[in-house]
């Protein structure tokens, strides 16, 4: 007779204990403890361990990687974000707001793989198979190797994958599949964690790449335990305004490459790659308007030109408001303080609004100088030269510091016709070009004089 071990797990934080309690000592929540049955007769093998095989320690140089070549997803932007293509045996988590296009992206992925590499299995636990077919017909993604199954039982899904042996498996979504041996509802902490662990073992032991859709909370984070993002190989967020035609696919974790972004244009026929993101983000830039500055940012290894827009206006309140879109509000407050103290621009009683156009979020320090110049441009109502880019980090003493990837940023600007850059003076020795003017500055005051000289 098999023995079963019962443990008690908090649905909120995942904390485990061997006895029931009405109160979780880890997250301080009441009535979140549920029972979980662990079957001791089914040992969990290590990742990559096939049945009947006991892995042995090897020298790192002896580990065989010849069986895991990447293959194309059929989308250049998705390949870029994944680090060069789909890795066999990888587990990829795709998150995003409802209606943003996650299912559209993965339907196109399944179709492309079905055309080029064989069977692709699309598991829909939220929609019916008929609904998936209607979407595939609209996208022109009909192929006999594109297999669809409407099922939520994880054990059946694993059996399907092992018997069919597809080139790709898509789970839509991880919050709706469940393991019947776990007495909790689909979407609970225990179910999400254990289903993801089962998919991880399936991917590593069979070499089948698995893509899973993750719901997001109202704060924008993927729902479920935080360990979900730690378990998978790659985490992608699909972002963008629902009422605009552009979408940004951003990698926030990738064990197989750098953190890149991909840009798509959505239409009636699905998602279309936008290989020149810089041109897209600057396509509707106002020329001659104050508060508009172009800054080259680095997403992974990809330079992208974005427009930083700032609006400084008088306030009806004693303390001005600070509102941002695409940039941290604390960075805005810091730069306003530096502008007041080091450049004499008294903005404390003014409202300040900042936006990064195109739906991109910028976190790197290289945007500091461009943001400060945009604020000063709006405050003085003086436009910046439209053929000038601005690069640099601003310190609390008002000094301008150097940044990385300067050459790549400038080359991207040259492609789009820019002719001048305001950069840290220490960066002048890094790059030289007779067709491009570099203005080196040491302080924020010098940068404002160079940018707003007209």
Image: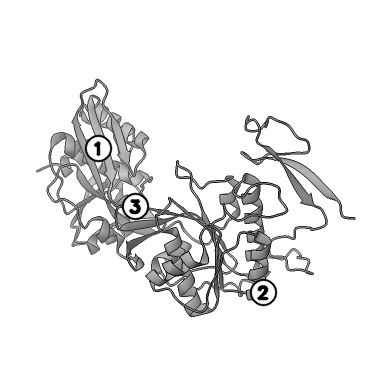
**Mark found first going from the N terminus, 3 or 2:** 2
**Mark found first going from the N terminus, 2 or 1:** 2
Do labels 3 and 2 touch, CB within 8 Å? no
Q: Secondary structure at mark 1?
A: helix
Q: Nearer the viewer, mark 2 or mark 1?
A: 2
Instruction: Give the crowd class for mark 3: few <14, some 14-19, many >=20 residues within 10 Å.
Output: few
- Residue sticking out furthest to the top: 318
Q: Secondary structure at mark 2?
A: helix
Residue 295, x across and y down, in percent: 27, 50
- The image shows residue 227, relative to residue 170, as above or below, that is above
The quarter of the picture where the N terminus appears is bottom right
Do labels 2 and 1 touch, CB within 8 Å? no
**Would you name the residue on which mark 1 appears?**
444
* Front-most of residues 199 and 334: 199
* Front-most of residues 222 and 177: 177
- Residue sticking out furthest to the right: 1
C-alpha distance separating marks 2 and 1: 65 Å
Q: Secondary structure at mark 3?
A: loop
Q: Is residue 254 visible to us here?
A: no
Q: Which mark is residue 163?
A: 2
* Front-most of residues 282 and 168: 168
- The image shows residue 216, relative to residue 111, as above or below, that is above
């Amino acid at each position: 007779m098999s023995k079963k071990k019962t443990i008690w797990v908090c649905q909120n934080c995942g904390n485990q204990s061997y006895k029931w309690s009405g109160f979780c000592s880890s997250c301080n929540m009441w009535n979140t403890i549920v029972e979980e049955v662990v079957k001791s007769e089914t040992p969990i093998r290590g990742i990559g361990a096939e049945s009947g095989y006991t892995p042995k320690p090897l020298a790192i140089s002896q580990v065989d990687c010849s069986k895991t070549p990447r293959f194309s997803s059929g989308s250049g932007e998705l390949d870029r974000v994944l680090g060069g293509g789909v890795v066999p045996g990888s587990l990829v988590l795709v998150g995003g707001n409802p209606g943003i296009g996650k299912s559209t992206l993965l339907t196109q992925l399944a179709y492309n793989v079905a055309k080029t590499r064989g069977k692709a299995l699309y598991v829909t636990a939220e929609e019916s198979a008929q609904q998936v077919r209607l979407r595939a017909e609209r996208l022109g993604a009909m192929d006999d190797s594109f297999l669809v199954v409407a099922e939520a039982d994880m054990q059946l899904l694993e059996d399907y994958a092992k018997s069919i042996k597809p080139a790709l498996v898509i789970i839509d979504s991880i919050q709706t599949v469940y393991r019947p041996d776990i007495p909790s509802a689909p979407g609970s902490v225990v179910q999400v964690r254990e289903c993801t662990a089962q998919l991880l073992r399936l991917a590593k032991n069979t070499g089948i790449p698995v893509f899973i859709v993750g719901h997001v909370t109202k704060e924008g984070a993927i729902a479920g335990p935080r360990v979900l993002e730690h378990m998978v190989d790659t985490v992608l967020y699909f972002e963008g305004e629902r009422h605009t035609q552009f979408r940004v696919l951003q990698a926030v974790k990738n064990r197989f490459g750098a953190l890149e972004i991909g840009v798509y244009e959505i239409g009636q026929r699905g998602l279309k790659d936008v290989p020149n993101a810089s041109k897209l983000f600057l396509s509707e830039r106002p020329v001659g308007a104050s508060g508009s500055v172009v800054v080259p940012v680095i997403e992974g290894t990809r330079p992208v030109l974005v427009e930083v827009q700032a609006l400084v206006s008088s306030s009806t309140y004693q303390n001005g408001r600070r509102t941002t879109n695409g940039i941290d509000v604390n960075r805005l407050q810091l730069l306003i303080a530096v502008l007041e103290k080091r450049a004499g621009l008294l903005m404390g009683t003014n409202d300040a609004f900042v936006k990064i156009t195109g739906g991109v979020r910028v976190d790197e320090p290289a945007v500091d100088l461009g943001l400060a110049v945009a604020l000063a441009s709006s405050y003085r109502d003086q436009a910046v030269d439209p053929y000038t880019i601005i690069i640099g980090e601003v310190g609390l003493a008002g000094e301008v510091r150097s940044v990385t990837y300067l050459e790549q940023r400038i080359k991207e600007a040259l492609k789009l016709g820019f002719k001048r850059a305001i950069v840290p003076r220490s960066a002048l020795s890094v790059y030289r070009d007779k067709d491009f003017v570099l203005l080196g500055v040491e302080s924020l005051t010098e940068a404002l004089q160079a940018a707003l000289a007209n």
